[in-house]
Image (cartoon, grey):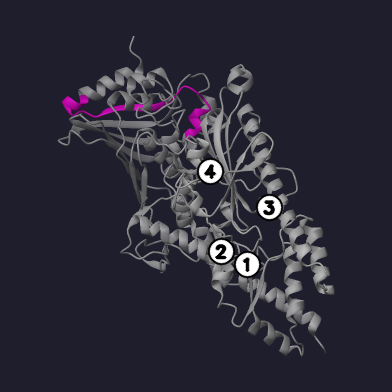
Amino acid sequence: MQDRAEQLALDIRRGRESGEVVKTTLSVDDRVLARVTDGIYRRPSSAFRELISNAYDADATEVILQTDAPRFERIVVRDNGLGMSPEVLADLVTHIGGSSKRTSKGKRLGTANLSDPTLSPGGRRLIGKIGIGLFSVAQLTQHFQMITKRRGDDFRTSAVVVLKTHTEEMLAADSDNQVFETGTVAITSEPAADIETQGTEIVLMELTPQARELLQGLDRWTLLDRAKDGDVDGAPPMPPSYHIGRVARDDADVYLEQPQLPWDPSDGPDARFRKLYAAVRQEVRTRKATPNIEESLDHYLGMIWLLSLAVPVRYIDRHPFELTADDGIGFYSFTSKSAEPVKLTGTETIGERLGLTSIIDPVGSFRVILDDVELLRPISFDRDLHGTSEIGRPLMFFGKVTSGLGAVPPDIGGGALSFEAYLYWNQKITPKENNGCLVRVNNASGVLFDPSFLGYQVSELTRLRQLMSEVFITEGLDAALNIDRESFNYSHPHYQYLQKWVHFAVRQTTNRLKQLNKELLDARRAAAAGHRVSRLENLVERVWRDRKGSDAEPPPEIRLAPGGQALLSDRERGVLVFNTDTLEAEAAARGSVIENAKLEALVKVLTAWGLLESLSWEEQQSLVADIMAVFGDQR
């Protein structure tokens, strides 16, 4: 007896000959999955991430997204992947939550590799697993169209989908049924002369007002309006440095705020993203010691950044495993007990030396272009320190792990688990959102950098803020991902094993940093033997040691400069630059005089307490000026 999917596939093929529209309903066999159209994902950008992941699994090499920003009235996502046959399309709409990927059915339908169903037909490790990613578009619209074609077919198939939202009352009324309808679909086929083309196009129509407002970042503009009217408690919020503009609610062609973009209209897709990346990094010069994406970029540009972190695109510079000795970074490899130095020769890469293979894509390059901006992974590994540590250069620590869980019964150990990872140390990680540990399962991630490093409990706050880490899962961990792929099941054996390893890696990294700092401190003290130390110097050293630890790196360099803006490059290195013109004017108004030695001591004490790092440069100047004025007031 034919199942519903097989019958639907036959009807689609007959419709190609007759021109008739084939109508059916979307359905699932599980009450819980019936809620998928209510939106299980956390943010609208999740829909783009899932559609990009589907294209990757279909062996696409290019995905193009057009969002109609800042209007967001119609969104198109187009890829050059394998496309869907009538059989695959029929299986998709009749088995939501029953993906053919990773199954023997996937081999038959051509959605999985013939020799290994956990791989794509071309050999990529599959990102999707349960077949609900397409319906993440429910975050944006209830109405969308799929147009798809496979290479060699003389026709293309179109499916118009209208999703259905469920309520608890509706599900309760249907509690006796085994099948839950999640929408309707109308499928048509038409002749295609381009026999050799392939791919899928998703058209999102009639975006909900709520989705459009979220994508436009309307809540932030509304808050700024309230601040102008004095209706906001505390310090008024700052507008984003870069944004796509603001359009009127009743006429999307009228700009209330003109766009402020970091690129020029003539720039190509690659150049646009590089200028976005550079703009965020350069915020350290003018806006804040540690730039923050949410403050620097509006919602749309921030979404571009977050998507670039999540999807399997190339790095803006190079993959961390492609770094060589010429990059000026100190390399270490984790052993079972410590982190040992690694010396590279010639043009040898760290990946070649340590046998790191997760960099390989068997299908080839994968490009994503969103509104003429090519997404590049916004992670680079500077050879210069963003600070003045005597260590003198950034450090990177690498590990490659094959757990023993594969030898444990699956119901206990969860199956095989293997991964590769790095930890990168620099005194400042820029932007702030790149600080932490990011886990990539099959080269993709639904989570962001975790600044706690998977719940590391030891008090290493300063050094944790100086670390950036990525873990590349090459086998396992899929089952530990929650259904929206934006969080983990913390009790799963794979997550617990990974968590313990990350904590081990952080501990060995910080131990090595402490050892290096202690060696430098001993050498500095030996060189300074006999030097007369002032009371202020003693005070600063005591406070620094009490707050940071006896093996901490020395206090930051302080630079006093007229105007305060002349030494922008120093700010990039982590030097604290202060405008002596402003400070002296404030002091003169109170009948006092700035003493540079006391000023430097004050700044170092404030830094030891962590009171400056979250402030903008202007706020740092104001705070120090106010404190100096209080203690220098002669009246």
Say which label, 4 or 1, has the lower sequence index.
Answer: 4
Residue 364 vertical position relative to residue 462 in the rendered view, above or below? above
Numbered disc 2: secondary structure: helix
For the point 70% across and 55% down, which residue is it?
Answer: 462
Residue 232's disc is 1
Q: In the image, which disc is placed on residue 463? A: 3
Name which of mark 3 and mark 4 comes first in the sequence. 4
Give the amino acid type for the residue marked by disc 4 in the picture.
Answer: Arg
- Disc 2 or 3, which lies upstream in sequence? 2
Name the residue at 33% across, 12% down.
Answer: 2
Q: CA distance from mark 1 to mark 2?
A: 8 Å
Q: Quadrant of the N terminus?
A: top left
| Mark 2 vs 3: CB contact within 8 A | no
The alpha-carbon separation of the residues under discs 2 and 4 comes to 22 Å
Q: Quadrant of the C terminus?
A: bottom right
Can residue 447 be seen from the camera position used here? yes
The amino acid type, in three-letter code, at marker 2 is Leu
Residue sticking out furthest to the top: 1
Secondary structure state at the residue bearing disc 1: loop
Do the numbered discs 2 and 4 sit on residues whose CB atoms are within 8 Å?
no
Q: Magenta residues?
A: 15-36
Q: Nearer the viewer, mark 4 or mark 1?
A: 4
The residue located at (62%, 18%) in the rendering is: 408
